[in-house]
Image (cartoon, rainbow, N blue to C red):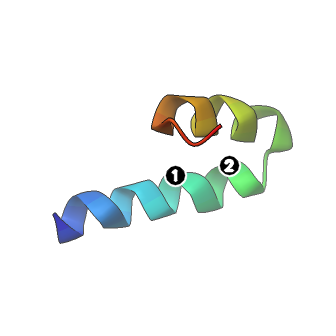
Amino acid sequence: MTAKKTIVVQQVASAARRPAIQTATLKGLGLN
């Protein structure tokens, strides 16, 4: 669970630097 959570955080942090991808990432995580 911890490892999986870390991966999600890394994906969100990475997407934050790429606004165009951020929306797609949030949709994929079900947060948008």
Residue under the image location 66 percent in, 28 percent down: 24
Amino acid tagged 2: Ala
Q: Are the two marked residues, 2 and 1, in contact with CB atoms closer than 8 angstroms?
A: yes
Distance between mark 2 and mark 1 Cα atoms = 6 Å
Image disc number at residue 21: none
Left or right of residue 17, residue 14 in this image: left
Give the structural element (helix, strand or loop) at label 1.
Answer: helix
Where's the N terminus, which quadrant? bottom left
Residue under the image location 72 percent in, 41 percent down: 22
Amino acid tagged 1: Gln
Position of residue 20 measured from the top left corner of the image (x, y, whole percent)? 82, 33
Position of residue 13 measured from the top left corner of the image (x, y, whole percent)? 62, 62
Residue under the image location 63 percent in, 55 percent down: 14
Left or right of residue 30, residue 32 in this image: right
Pick whichever, 31 or 2, lies toward us.
31
Position of residue 29 measured from the top left corner of the image (x, y, whole percent)? 48, 38
Pick out the residue farthest to the right.
19
Give the structural element (helix, strand or loop) at label 2.
Answer: helix
Left or right of residue 1, residue 22 in this image: right
Q: Is residue 10 above or below residue 18?
A: below
Pick out the residue farthest to the left.
1
Mark 1 crowd level (few <14, some 14–19, many ≥20, 10 Å Cα)? some
- The answer to which image quadrant residue 32 occupies is top right
Residue under the image location 47 percent in, 63 percent down: 9
Q: Could you tell me how many numbered marks the image carries?
A: 2
Image disc number at residue 11: 1
Residue annotated with mark 2: 15
